[in-house]
Amino acid sequence: MLTSIAFGLAILLNLALCAIGVRFFVAPRAAAAGYGVVANEHGDSAYLTIKAVRDTTFGILGLTLLAFSGARAAGLFMLVGALVPLADTAIVLRHGGRRAIAFGVHFATAVALLVDAGLLLSI
């Protein structure tokens, strides 16, 4: 049961990360607003593209680790990967974004990654 929950949550988190990355490719300005730092109308295209590539790549990497490496590698990936949404929390707060997004999206994602890391590493 614990194995199913750990792997299910890991798959869900990694697919969500891929979806966020794809959203930054398809609708970058809307995705940036959802991230919590609104993109400049006449700039910031590099930030939007970097975010798209980063999230999509990390999501695919996480899914690859789950498929080919097992619970320990995936758990360590989730543990280290939690640094990204923690940094995103600080970025949103530092750049005048809403606290609700900083904590309700980014910090909550970090907590979910840490919980899943714990589950995967306990298998």
Image (spheres, rainbow, N blue to C red):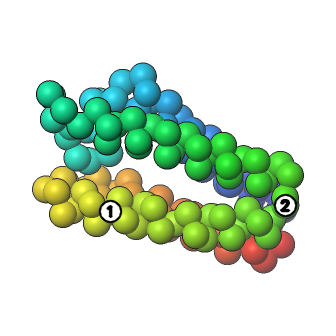
Q: Position of residue 85 (x, y in %)?
A: 43, 60
Residue positioned most to the front: 46
Badge 1 or badge 2: first in the primary sequence: 2
Quadrant showing the C terminus: bottom right
Q: Position of residue 107 (x, y in %)?
A: 39, 64
Query: Circle 2 sits in a helix, a strand or a loop, which is it?
Result: loop
Q: Position of residue 67 (x, y in %)?
A: 83, 49
Nearer to us in this view, 78 or 47? 47
Which residue is disc 2 drawn over? 70
- Amino acid at dot 2: Gly
In the picture, measured across the screen, residue 110 lies left or right of residue 64, that is left
- Amino acid at dot 1: Thr
Residue 69 sits in which quadrant? bottom right
Residue at horizontal 32 percent and vertical 37 percent from the top: 46
Which residue is disc 1 drawn over? 89
Q: Is residue 16 visible?
A: no
Q: Count neighbours of disc 1 (C-alpha within 10 A) and say few if under 14, some if 14 to 19, many if 20 or more.
A: many
Residue at horizontal 26 percent and vertical 47 percent from the top: 36
Q: Is residue 3 visible?
A: yes
